Amino acid sequence: MNMPRLAMAAVAATLVDLVYGFAVYGTAMAASFAAFPGVFRSTETQTAYLPIMFGGILVGMFAATYIYAKGYEGGNGVREGLRFGLLMAIFNAGYFVATSYGILNIGRRLTLAMALAGLGEWLLVGATIGLIYRSAVGGAGARSAKAAKV
C-alpha cells in the first residue's frame, strides 16, 4: 500500500467532496432541506459547525481511501474507483439515507434526492480516489506484485 498516494487521494477526495457538497447539498438541495425546519440546521447556523464537518469528511475520506486501497485489484484506476464509488453509494443509500428516512421527519422525495445525490457524490469521489491512487501504483507492475504475494 502506497501511504503517500493514499494521503494524496484522501485529501483530493475531501476537496472534491466539499465542492460537490456545496454545489449539491448546500445550493441545489437547500430549499429541500429548508422545507423540514427543526430537522436540519438553518443556513445561518451552519457556519459555526463547518470546521467539524470538514474534519469529519477528511477522516471519512482517509477511511474510504484505505478501504479502496485494500480492495484495489490493479486495473484501470478510474474504472476501479467508479466501481468502489458505486458500492459506497449503495452502502450510503442503505445505511445512511434509508436510516435517515426511518428516524428523521423527512419525506420520500427528499429521501430519494439524498440517495441520488449520494450516488453522484460517491461516483465522483471514487473516481478521484482511483485516479490518484492508481497513478502511483502502475498497471502490470501492480498485478505482478500482487500475484507474487500469493
Image: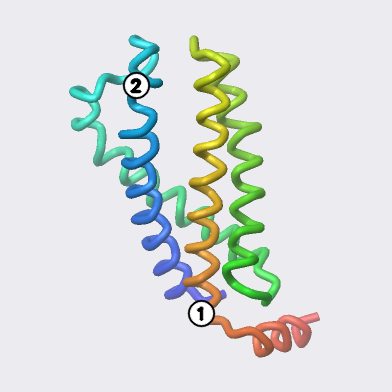
Q: Is residue 106 left or right of residue 46?
A: right
Residue shown at 64% from the left, 84% from the top: 139
Label 1 crowd (10 A; few <14 / some 14-19 / many >=20): some
Name the residue tied to disc 1: 135
Q: Position of residue 87 (x, y in %)?
A: 66, 49
Sequence-first disc among 1 and 2: 2
Q: Secondary structure at mark 2?
A: helix
Front in this rendered view, residue 7 or 120: 120
Front in this rendered view, residue 88 or 147: 88
Q: Position of residue 146 (x, y in %)?
A: 72, 81
Give the residue type at disc 2.
Ala
Q: Is residue 140 left or right of residue 119?
A: right
Residue shown at 54% from the left, 19% from the top: 109
Whether residue 93 is situated above or below residue 86 in the rendered picture: above
Task: Please identify the residue farthest to the right as the structure is shown.
Answer: 150
Residue shown at 51% from the left, 72% from the top: 133
Name the residue tied to disc 2: 31
Q: Are marks 1 and 2 in contact (CB under 8 Å)?
A: no
Q: Quadrant of residue 25?
A: top left
Whether residue 97 is situated above or below residue 85 in the rendered picture: above
Q: Is residue 90 left or right of residue 115?
A: right
Q: Secondary structure at mark 1?
A: helix
Front in this rendered view, residue 8 or 59: 8
Assign the C terminus to one quadrant of the image.
bottom right
Residue shown at 40% from the left, 50% from the top: 17
Single out the mark in the foreground, 1 or 2. 2
